[in-house]
Amino acid sequence: MAKRIDIKDLDIYYGDFKAVEGVNLAIEPQSVTAFIGPSGCGKSTELRSLNRMHEVIPARTPKARSCSMGENIYALDVDR
Ligand SMILES: Nc1ncnc2c1ncn2[C@@H]1O[C@H](COP(=O)(O)OP(=O)(O)O)[C@@H](O)[C@H]1O
Ligand SMILES: [Mg+2]
């Protein structure tokens, strides 16, 4: 069953540079959601954090109060 994506207070860094700050976002199951905004505002960074591809970039750190699809996708016991 499709799950809701629920993001609370997401910050994403490249090293010391905070590229995304304080994102709160809910995406309902079986809905279409578009990220729009000027170049460099963080659309790709945000999207990469949802499939955990941000972690393959050196010196990257996503931090969120919670980032869940039914469970916290950044919990230590979640397989990559
Ligand atoms: N690999 C990276 N290393 C350092 N900074 C990055 C990297 N990728 C993107 N950034 C910076 O993060 C910010 C957001 O970029 P990005 O998510 O690519 O924006 P968008 O997709 O909205 O154009 C920009 O300031 C960009 O320069
Ligand atoms: Mg982009």
Image (cartoon, helix red, strand yellow):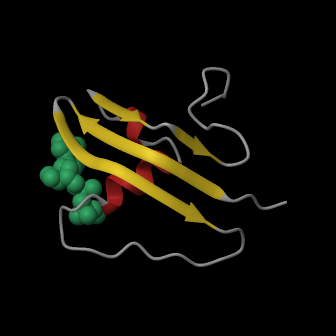
Nearer-the-camera pick, 62 or 57: 62
Measuring 67% from the left and 21% from the top, which residue is drawn there?
77
Residue 24 rendering spot, x and y as whole percentages: 45, 56
Residue 3 rendering spot, x and y as whole percentages: 74, 58
In the image, ligand 2 is in what quadrant? Answer: bottom left
| For residue 33, above or below residue 24 | below
Q: Is residue 58 left or right of residue 63?
A: left
Q: Residue furthest right?
A: 1
Look at the image and tell me in which quarter the C terminus lies. top right
Nearer-the-camera pick, 7 or 34: 7
Residue 35 rendering spot, x and y as whole percentages: 39, 72
Q: Is residue 35 left or right of residue 79?
A: left
Q: Residue furthest top?
A: 76
Nearer-the-camera pick, 47 or 21: 21
Give the image quarter of residue 60. Answer: top left
Measuring 60% from the left and 21% from the top, which residue is drawn there?
76
| For residue 6, above or below residue 66 | below
Give the total of numbered labels.
Answer: 0
Measuring 26% from the left and 26% from the top, which residue is drawn there?
59
Measuring 16% from the left and 30% from the top, which residue is drawn there?
16
Q: Is residue 45 left or right of residue 7?
A: left
Residue 39 rendering spot, x and y as whole percentages: 18, 69
Q: Is residue 54 left or right of residue 7?
A: left
Give the image quarter of residue 54. Answer: top left
